[in-house]
Image: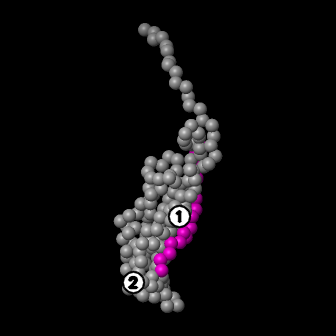
Amino acid sequence: MEQWKIISEIYKQIATRTGAIVYPDVKITVNINDICQCMIDKSGQRIIVDEKQYEQPAVYEMSVEILFEGNNIDMLLQAYGEAAVLFKDNPEIDIVKYNWHGSSTDKIYLEPVIRHVDHGNVNYCEGVYRYSLIYKTEFSLNSQKAYGFKRVEKRDIYGVVKK
């Protein structure tokens, strides 16, 4: 399993969903603004998968921007609203074949980045309006380095009980 392809899969699923939103004179693009490892396991714990031992998956956070550009403000705002509702109602991304060790679900959640309005921001430049929706998500990447693992033998324990 090429689990490291999860990053590309997240991008493709978001791009596919936004690709279904079509308005005249509106260009919608999906950008990955940033990806970073946000947590490291220093406890030395291991995960056992198929009789092999692996380090804990590394946790990553990714920032995704859906950018809307166009010169027709009405169409642009309609496209923006449609995408906002789409991801509000369907924030999950299916990651079944790219799931990581120890995950209890086959989905990740696309969380909107909450911020205050920037009153000084100018979204109109050279005849084009630009607005964006920004989301973040967390996922994990498995270690590909496996260590041997031997199960403890099951034995019956006998003893004498003294009275």
Q: Amino acid at mark 1?
A: Met
Q: Nearer the viewer, residue 150 or 43?
A: 150
Q: Residues within 10 Å of mark 1 (few under 14, many from 20)?
A: some
Up-down relation of residue 5 to residue 88 (above or below):
above
Q: Nearer the viewer, residue 8 or 31?
A: 8
Badge 2 element:
helix
Up-down relation of residue 33 to residue 148 (above or below):
below
| Magenta portion: prevailing SS class | strand
Task: Point out the stretch of residues depicted in magenta.
Answer: 27-44
Q: Residue at x 42, y 87 (%)?
A: 72
Applied colour scheme: one colour
Q: Position of residue 44 (x, y in %)?
A: 60, 43
Q: Residue at x 42, y 60 (%)?
A: 92
Q: Amino acid at mark 2?
A: Met
The residue tagged 1 is: 62
Q: Residues within 10 Å of mark 2 (few under 14, many from 20)?
A: some
The residue tagged 2 is: 75
